[in-house]
Image (tube, coloured by chain):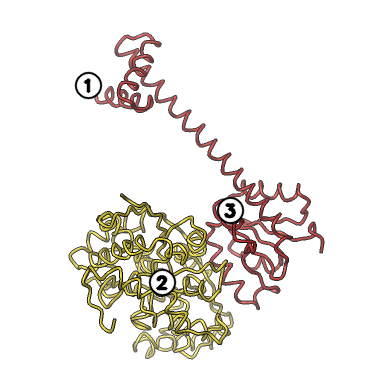
Chain colours: A red, B yellow
């Protein structure tokens, strides 16, 4: 069997991440890639698909179900085992840290599976970075709203000009060694309490 | 100097010991800070300990035993230097199956619960569809308890029913949706279903095997070898937390701590029922009494015997030697000498 003919199943509750992994695998030349999310009939679908490789997010509770299923060989046509890196375990550790786990049909040579697992690891890691950046951007936007609101309150209630209001917040933050957004939040709270 | 350890736990009542060790300061007194990491399922918990993402975890006693036998997953050897209590599992069936069992054999349902599966056998004989049951992991006492209960009723667990695995937090939902007819899981996932009226408890661990092992604190064998002092400190913190959790006077507070959303969560009332004296649940959860924290090798040997009985492990297996290599009674004794704990036969 050529590598391109491997049937690969990606199981992920996060459809965005699954799509990122799928795209990576297809671009690398693996054409038989299928995706499933949370499914009431996971066992039935795996039986029907008979994949050579299953990539599943490490945290997915469906893994407990899968491991039982792979035990009972009469359920699946071919025995499936967890992917183990026989060259010292460094790659499995990387996979666990990235949140990836993989199961492969018994007997498939490790080095033929490695590129698939490597691809999944790098895509999971890239997805994680993207998500972190997005979360950071959201947090920054939320911070700016708080600061703008505090500035507005200082201008309206204390009659300060915009740049003076901002300078006051900054100076206070530096003096107290606190974050600007924390000072802004304190200002808002103080005005809300009307003191 | 404080050593920080990452400790995994699954939201079940018997995560109480590591939770209390951190919350009530027993870890701190041993120079440890426990970062408690909530996990939703067992395979992920096992792999995170095996590959060092977690230092230790609240784990099914069968998982380190399986790891030493080379079964399941990547099989990085793990050991158990301390056990985390006894009891807490039960078998729950859907309300409709319960009614069919009562109809089929009222005598069996009125008798000792260990034999209530006799009624199930009659239900199975009269039904066309195979009934489906679930436990929480292939190598769990839940699996062996459910299989023993079925076998005591004359039911062949491998032929007469479908037997699958579902992670504990998903169990009640699957029963409610009608995807399974019954399950064996730890609390609070039985009492919660009973409280909702969607299922009925037909047997508890106490009915089947009261002293069978349950959860342990599992660590990687290599890691334990490299950090003997830390392991000893961890064992002492767990044992003292278990003593605290066992005291009836502390159970109310324990229920409140476990009810926090980042711990077990859910209904505080169900947790109180499971833990408080006189509410029907006391006795199901033993944290310290009856040597509940001691990792007796004969308990690991019992687990190996179950694995062989149900075809998970292939004989010949040197059960006694393997059991002593995974349930580390010796490490427990060394660590707890200073606590003055009496251990019969130790």
Tag in front: 2 or 1:
1
Badge 3 density bin: few <14, some 14–19, many ≥20, Cα 10 Å: some
Do the CB atoms of the residues marked 2 and 1 lie less than 8 Å apart?
no
Is any part of residue B146 visible from this angle? no
Per the image, the residue denoted by label 2 is B199
| Residue matched to label 3 | A94
Q: CA distance from mark 2 to mark 3?
A: 42 Å
Chain for mark 1?
A
Disc 1: which residue: A195
Q: From mark 3 to mark 1, how far is it between C-alphas?
A: 54 Å
| Residue B2: % across, % down | 32, 50
Identity of the residue drawn at 55% across and 74% down: B71
Quadrant in the picture for the C terminus of chain B: bottom left
Other residues around mark 1 within 10 Å, as few (<14) / some (14–19) / many (≥20)? few
Whether pointer 2 and pointer 3 mark residues with C-beta atoms closer than 8 Å, the reply is no
Q: Is residue A166 left or right of residue A62?
A: left
User: For the residue carrying disc 2, how many other residues have a C-alpha within 10 Å: few (<14), some (14-19), or many (20+)?
Assistant: many
Residue A175 percent coordinates (x, y): 31, 21
Q: Residue at x 37, y 18 (%)?
A: A170
Q: Is residue A192 above or below residue A104?
A: above
Q: Quadrant of residue B186?
A: bottom left
Q: Are marks 3 and 1 in contact (CB under 8 Å)?
A: no
Task: Please tell me whether mark 3 sits on a helix, a strand or a loop.
Answer: helix
Labels 2 and 3 share a subunit? no
């Amino acid at each position: 069997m050529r590598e391109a003919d491997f049937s690969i199943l990606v199981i992920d509750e996060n459809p965005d991440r699954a799509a990122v992994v799928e795209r990576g695998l297809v671009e690398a030349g693996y054409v038989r890639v299928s995706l499933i999310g949370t499914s009431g009939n996971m066992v039935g679908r795996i039986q029907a698909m008979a994949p050579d490789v299953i990539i599943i997010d490490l945290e997915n509770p469906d893994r407990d179900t899968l491991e039982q299923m792979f035990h009972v060989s009469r359920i699946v046509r071919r025995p499936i085992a967890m992917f183990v890196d026989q060259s010292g375990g460094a790659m499995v550790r990387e996979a666990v840290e990235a949140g990836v786990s993989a199961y492969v049909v018994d007997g498939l040579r490790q080095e033929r599976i490695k590129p698939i697992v490597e691809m999944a690891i790098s895509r999971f890691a890239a997805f994680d970075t993207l998500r972190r950046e997005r979360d950071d951007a959201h947090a920054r936007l939320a911070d700016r709203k708080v600061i703008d609101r505090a500035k507005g309150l200082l201008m309206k209630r204390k009659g300060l000009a915009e740049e003076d209001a901002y300078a006051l917040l900054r100076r206070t933050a530096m003096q107290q060694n606190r974050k600007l957004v924390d000072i802004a939040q304190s200002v808002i709270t103080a005005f809300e309490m009307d003191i | 100097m404080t050593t920080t350890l990452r400790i995994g736990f699954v939201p079940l009542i018997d995560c109480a010991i590591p939770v209390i060790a951190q919350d009530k300061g027993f870890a701190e007194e041993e120079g440890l800070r426990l970062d408690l990491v909530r996990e939703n399922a067992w395979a992920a918990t096992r792999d995170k300990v095996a590959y060092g993402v977690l230092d230790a975890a609240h784990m099914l006693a069968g998982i380190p035993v399986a790891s030493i036998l080379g079964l399941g997953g990547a099989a990085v050897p793990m050991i158990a230097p301390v056990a985390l209590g006894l009891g807490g599992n039960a078998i729950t069936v859907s309300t409709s199956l319960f009614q069919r069992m009562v109809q089929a054999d009222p005598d069996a349902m009125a008798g000792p619960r260990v034999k209530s599966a006799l009624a199930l056998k009659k239900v199975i004989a009269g039904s066309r569809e195979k009934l489906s049951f679930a436990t929480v992991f292939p190598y769990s006492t839940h699996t062996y308890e459910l299989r023993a209960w079925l076998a005591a009723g004359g039911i062949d667990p491998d032929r007469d029913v479908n037997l699958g695995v579902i992670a504990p937090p998903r169990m009640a939902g699957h029963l409610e949706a009608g995807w399974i007819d019954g399950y064996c899981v730890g609390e609070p996932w039985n009492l919660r279903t009973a409280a909702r009226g969607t299922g009925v408890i037909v047997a508890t661990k106490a009915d089947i095997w009261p002293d069978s092992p349950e959860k342990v604190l599992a660590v990687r064998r290599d890691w334990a070898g490299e950090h003997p002092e830390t392991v000893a400190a961890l064992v002492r913190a767990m044992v003292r937390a278990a003593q605290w959790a066992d005291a009836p006077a502390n159970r109310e507070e324990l229920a409140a701590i476990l009810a926090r959303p980042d711990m077990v969560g859910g209904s505080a009332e169900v947790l109180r029922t499971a833990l408080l004296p006189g509410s029907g649940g006391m006795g199901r959860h033993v944290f310290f009494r009856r040597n509940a924290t001691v990792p007796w090798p004969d308990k690991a040997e019992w687990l190996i015997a179950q694995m062989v009985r149900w075809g998970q492990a292939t004989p010949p297996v040197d059960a006694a030697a393997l059991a002593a290599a995974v349930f580390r009674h010796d490490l427990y004794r060394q660590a707890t000498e200073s606590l003055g704990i009496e251990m019969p036969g130790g």
